[in-house]
Structure formats: structure tokens, C-alpha cells
Image (cartoon, rainbow, N blue to C red):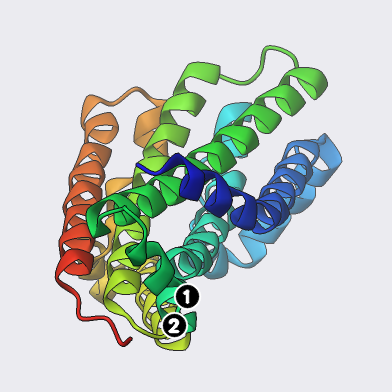
């Protein structure tokens, strides 16, 4: 890994990272404060009045405990979607953008192999994602302990966050692969956003159940079962390991693709 390039890429990524981390932390604050009894009654009324909508969004799970409530509204929608949007943008910024504007030619002219450059930019993506989820998880735990001391089951919550990180790594590997293969920023953005949106839409449709329930087999979201993880179900805790395997394969393919790629300059 090239540490100079790593530090440079981290600095370029930091403003976007900060925006998304703050947004997710504010959302976490809103979710924790929603546990107020009055607000909780309003949310229950909303769920009962719009059952199908809440089911599609993945926010109709049992919330009979504080931890289940936090997980339901925290990891039901935005905390899955926002890191994915961040990944789409940053993966393009780290690779396809450098190829598109010609700066990749300067990087390749330096005494650094393609493998080293690709590995460095990959590590930037992984580290920023890890720090983002770790920061939001830490903020959520602090908020829960401040407003509702002792009510959050911290260990299951940490395990679930680790599983969500595995899910985001799988999407990161996919986006990084497409970014390594693309020569243009716009093309890479369209492909990455389209692929991520497709999987997210499939998840929403699969949540409807019925004749569309088979769709759960074609989306990686199915490998994350928050309810099972909170109950310490062994299978639910081990399934996300498949996501790590997928991530490793995709990142390896991305590295190999970049090494064999014909540059447009």
C-alpha cells in the first residue's frame, strides 16, 4: 500500500464522509428520541394505519423491547441506504475519476504498480466505511445510555452493526469492481447507482411477500436477519460471513481487472 496516496485519498474523501456520518448520527438521535412513550404511540398508530408501507420499508418488525425498537427504525431503511450511496460516490471518486481526468497516468508513472495503487484505493474505501459505521454505532450507544441507561443490549447491537458492515462491504466490492473497469466518471456512477438501486428495489419488493417472496433469494439483504441476530440465533449470526466472502471475491476481481485494463491515455 502507498501511504502517501492513502492519506491524500482520505483527505479528499473526508468532507463527504463527514456529511454522511453527521446525517446518520442525526438520524440515530431522532430514532432514540422517538422511543418517548407519546411518540411511540404515534409510531404504532402509523404502523397500524400503513402496514403494507412499513412492511416494504422493513420497519414492521416486533418492537416490544427498546433494542428491537432501535434496530427496527435504525437499520430498517436509512442506515442501510446512506452508506450504500456513500459507497457509490466514493468508489467512483477513488478510481474511475482518476482515469477520466488523466491523473491516473501520473500515478502509474510513479514507482508504484497497478496492484499497489488499486490496493491503496480499496483500503481507503474499506476504512472510511468502517469508521462511518463505527462512529454511528458509537453515537447510538452513547445516546441510548444517556437517555435510557441500561436498556440497550449492547453486544447484540454490536454484532448486528458488524453484520451490516459485511453487507456494505459486499456492495463496496461490487461498486469498486465496476469503477475499476470504467474509464468515465458518469458511466461508473450510472452503473454503480443502477446496480445498488436494483438490489434495494428487489429488497423492497421481497418484503411484500406473497408471489414476490422468491425475490429474497436474489438480494444480499436477505443474509441480514436483525431479529435473529438480536436473539443470538447462530445461523443469523453466521450468514453474513457469506457477504464477506462475496466482498473478498469482488475486490480481488476488481484488482485483477485494473491490472489488465487498457487505459484510454
| 126 shown above or below 68 | below
Image marks 2 and 1: residues in contact by CB distance under 8 Å: yes
- Residue at left offset 18%, top offset 53%: 252
CA separation in Å, label 2 and label 1: 5 Å
**Considering the numbered disc 2 on the image, is that residue within a helix, a strand or a loop?**
helix
Q: Nearer the viewer, residue 196 or 113?
A: 113
Q: Nearer the viewer, residue 173 or 258?
A: 258
Q: Give the residue number, with chain letter if any, for mark 1.
A: 97
Q: Residue furthest top?
A: 150
Q: In x, y percent, where is residue 127?
A: 47, 41
Is residue 71 left or right of 30 when viewed as pictured?
left
Is residue 103 left or right of 39 when viewed as pictured?
left
| 161 shown above or below 118 | above
Q: In x, y percent, where is residue 47?
A: 63, 58
Q: Quadrant of residue 132?
A: top right
Query: Does residue 230 appear in this view?
Result: yes
Local crowd size for mark 1, using a 10 Å CA cut-off: few (<14), some (14–19), many (≥20):
many
Query: Does residue 221 appear in this view?
Result: no
Q: In x, y percent, where is residue 149?
A: 74, 14
Q: Give the residue number, with chain letter if any, for mark 2.
A: 100
- Residue at left offset 30%, top offset 70%: 180
Amino acid at each position: 500500500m502507498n501511504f502517501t496516496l492513502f492519506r491524500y485519498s482520505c483527505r479528499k474523501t473526508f468532507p463527504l464522509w463527514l456529511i454522511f456520518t453527521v446525517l446518520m448520527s442525526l438520524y440515530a438521535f431522532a430514532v432514540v428520541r422517538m422511543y418517548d412513550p407519546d411518540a411511540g404511540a404515534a409510531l404504532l398508530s402509523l404502523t397500524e394505519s400503513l402496514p403494507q408501507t412499513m412492511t416494504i420499508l422493513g420497519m414492521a418488525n416486533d418492537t416490544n423491547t427498546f433494542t428491537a425498537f432501535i434496530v427496527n427504525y435504525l437499520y430498517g431503511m436509512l442506515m442501510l441506504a446512506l452508506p450504500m450511496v456513500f459507497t457509490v460516490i466514493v468508489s467512483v471518486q477513488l478510481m474511475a475519476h482518476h482515469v477520466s481526468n488523466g491523473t491516473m497516468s501520473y500515478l502509474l508513472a510513479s514507482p508504484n504498480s497497478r496492484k499497489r495503487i488499486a490496493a491503496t484505493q480499496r483500503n481507503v474505501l474499506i476504512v472510511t466505511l468502517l469508521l462511518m459505521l463505527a462512529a454511528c454505532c458509537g453515537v447510538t450507544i452513547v445516546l441510548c445510555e444517556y437517555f435510557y441507561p441500561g436498556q440497550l443490549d449492547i453486544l447484540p447491537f454490536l454484532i448486528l452493526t458488524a453484520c451490516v458492515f459485511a453487507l456494505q462491504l459486499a456492495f463496496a466490492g461490487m461498486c469498486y469492481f465496476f469503477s475499476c473497469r470504467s474509464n468515465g466518471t458518469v458511466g461508473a456512477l450510472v452503473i454503480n447507482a443502477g446496480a445498488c438501486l436494483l438490489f434495494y428495489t428487489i429488497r423492497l419488493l421481497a418484503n411484500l411477500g406473497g408471489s414476490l417472496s422468491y425475490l429474497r433469494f436474489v438480494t444480499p439483504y436477505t443474509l441480514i436477519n436483525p431479529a435473529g441476530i438480536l436473539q443470538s440465533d447462530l445461523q443469523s449470526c453466521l450468514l453474513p460471513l457469506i457477504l464477506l466472502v462475496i466482498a473478498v471475491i469482488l475486490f480481488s476481481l476488481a484488482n485483477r481487472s485494473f491490472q489488465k485494463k487498457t487505459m484510454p491515455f
